[in-house]
Amino acid sequence: MGKQEFNIVGKPIPVKDAREKVTGSLKYAVDFEVQGMVHGKILRCPHPHARVTRIDASRALALPGVIGVLTHEDAPQLEWHGCWFNYRGKIIDGVGRFVGDELGAVAAVSPAIAEKALGLIDVEYELLPAVFDAEEAMQPGAPQVRDDGNAREPVVTEWGDVEAGRRDADEIIETTMVFGSQQMASIGRNACIAEWNGDRLTLWTSSQTPSELRDALAQGLGVPQSKVRVQAFPTGSSFGLWWSNNFMMVTALLAKKIRRPVKIELDNEECFGTVKRRHKERTRGSIGFTKKGDITFIDVKHIIDNGAYGYKNEVGFFCCDNWGTVPNGHYSVQGVSTNLVTAGCMRGVGDVTLGTCVERMHDMVAERLDIDPLTFRIKKQMREGDRLRSAMGQDAVMGDVDQYLAQLPEELRARMPKPFHLSSGSTHDILVRGGKEFQFAERWKGWGKPYSVSRRKSRAVGVATGIHCCGVEFEGNTNAMVRINPDGSVKLHCAVGRQGQGSETTLSQVAAETLGIPIAMVEIETGDTDSCPWSHGSIASNTMYRTGFAAWAASLDARRQILEIAGRNIFDCDPSGLDIQDGMVFQKSHGSNRLVSITEIMHLIRNDALGQQSSIVGRPAFAMPPSTTFARHFAAHFVDLEVDLETGEIKLLDYLAAQDSGTVVNPQVLKNQVIGGAICGAGFALYEELVFDETSGKVRNAGFLDYKLLRTPDFPANAKALFGESYDPVGPFGARGAGEAPIAAAVPAICQAVYNATGHWFDIPMTPERIAMKLSAQKQAAL
């Protein structure tokens, strides 16, 4: 289906909270207080691996102003599981597994007194051996971070016969790539406020995943989910940091012990060094090809460092789909525990790391074949209708695909694309159009060849692609609810995060378009788990595709009810003959000029109930098809940069980010997502890396002073965004996900451009020091 015009969808409507953001009146968790609240501080482990043998809080409790002290002796020894095992462990159990791990907490009448009390708690430790490298942690005899061992079972995606592909290859290329650990580096700090009313907990914090957080609290505290209410505030730029975090669990336990509301507010060092980070990762791969240009196989092994409490066995990678035209493939991903701060999902997880190495491997093939990278991608990457290679969901299908489809409800089967085949979109359109817009062919001079060298400055271009899922159906189906009030206004309830991506606006556009009402009549509740139905939250590029589908389906149900009432009580016709536009119901035919407002319909004396309609509640009447089996979103990025061959400094000169996310619901919001992803990826490619102490594993650059981020002048001010025009058969009004493919394309595009400017491939990040040292060593070797 081609591009369509809508009344509200597709329009650059300003984000709903713009005024609050620019005036500083938007409330985050750090701004919130409750009556009678006291303040908490967390007791943290000073060692990378240690067991508490004695803890004495008597001196702290004697300090005036101290309300109570929490230790592992007060904690239920229950494990809680973060979404997709970003965390798995007990809240506090008397063992510290990294420097900064939570061992307890203090509550006092002020933060200063609580901080002072921490120093008065006497703790004795049994020091345990520690390990900081994932591959060392896999070796026999390595220190064990977890009782169930360090290494998770590898997750394997494979097809064809790799060994046959090796035999068919005329040449095989092998490569290894190492990635540092990126920090989400949220500008805003987080806080958590917990209050118990009898046996019922209310918790206020900034979170992308309010439903998941409620479930985690219930699990870790051993209470029913109905006893837990989460009210999630906006997070600011989260990038995956503020999901379900252990400091939130500690806050809830501390409040329960002292029976007063407690607020724990993290400082900047705690945000950087004790909560969560991107994995440190290493990829080894080989790829074979023939002299005719056919790729015969790809074989990849990827290791991720989970830190102390991450429990992921894979990184949700979809790059194997984008290059899935290769006839034989084998991808193995394995998670490993270490005594570093917990690692987990950060924006573009898997496809920004493993995907960058896969892009590089194909670049190396293209160079050997003397084909430019743009042409190579257009020829070799997947198209609509191609078989998907990633394995998610395939093992859950009983029988073959036809048998699976036959047992589905008709409503779902009618909307179900062919499982395990790409339903819409690809990189093809955005590569072709982006290449022309960027004038890539005119700037391209060959592999390892800059288009300009002036003294010590070398300039070159690069292009790369990114891919990611559009949400996942595992762990529960995302839901939404629509309530139409007596005055015709609408409240949309859906549990999503507010991290600057504009979902409160774009989801309101979906509801308004479906209902046929002005967007000014739609408000949205995103954070209260007592009013919002369960949702994955804003993760895995889920929000527009899966939550948007639920918002559309719930709005469709509410619209049906409006038209049924109007048809029966006003127009005396079948509801199918009615429509809604600008909040007015009318007949589609017969030349009728009669317009009836939704407000009037809500105030009718209904003949079936002899009373007015108090409200209408809409909910999805059918489930969304499993999106991992057919949906992806795509990015293609073009970059022009300059490398100082003496200092190693890289300067980005020009940038174009092309994106295929199906229908563009709000072009300004999508542009912000796309360019924001490029900036986040550029930071990872060029500067961002947590530095760990070699003997303790402690984060040494935990703060904005020492952790280097891109600044405003570091990214081209004239960067452009270009959107594909595919239409998804399932997504709301043809839209798909958008948030993570941009960062996945940015890193390999910059890597390729640096190679063309210097003649060398580098690990990530490509800091000035690393580039200067490698180029200097090359120069010395040539003498």
Image: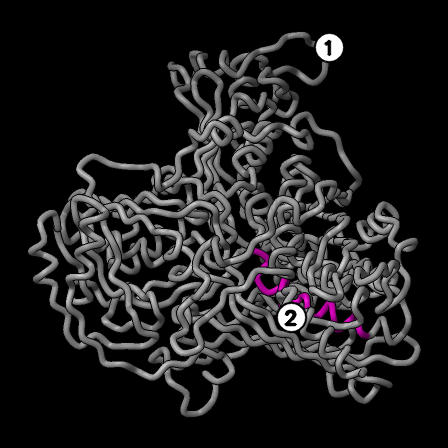
**Residue 165 % position (x, y):** 78, 83
Looking at the image, residue 144 sits to the left or right of residue 221; the answer is: right
> Mark 2 = which residue?
770
> Mark 1 = which residue?
591
- Name the amino acid type tagged 2: Arg
Q: From where the camera sits, is residue 496 visible?
A: no
Residue at 49 percent of width and 58 percent of height: 706
**Residue 445 % position (x, y):** 91, 62
Instruction: Name the quadrant containing residue 776.
Output: bottom right
Q: Residue furthest toward the bottom?
A: 140
Tell which tag, 2 or 1, sits nearer the viewer: 2
- Name the amino acid type tagged 1: Gly
What span is in magenta? 347-364
Q: From where the camera sits, is residue 247 visible?
A: yes
Instruction: Name the quadrant containing residue 88.
Output: bottom left
**Residue 122 % position (x, y):** 15, 68
- Does 357 appear in magenta? yes
Chief SS of the magenta region: helix
In front: 409, or 265? 265
In front: 552, or 80? 80
Q: Which mark is residue 31?
A: none
Instruction: Name the quadrant containing residue 581.
Output: top right
Looking at the image, residue 533 sits to the left or right of residue 559; the answer is: left
Q: Secondary structure at mark 1?
A: loop
Between the C-alphas of marks 2 and 1, the distance is 74 Å
Q: Secondary structure at mark 2?
A: helix
**Residue 726 % position (x, y):** 76, 45
- Does 477 appear in magenta? no
Above or below: residue 584 compared with residue 715: above
In front: 328, or 406? 328
Q: Earlier in the sequence, mark 2 or mark 1?
A: 1
Residue at 82 percent of width and 53 percent of height: 431
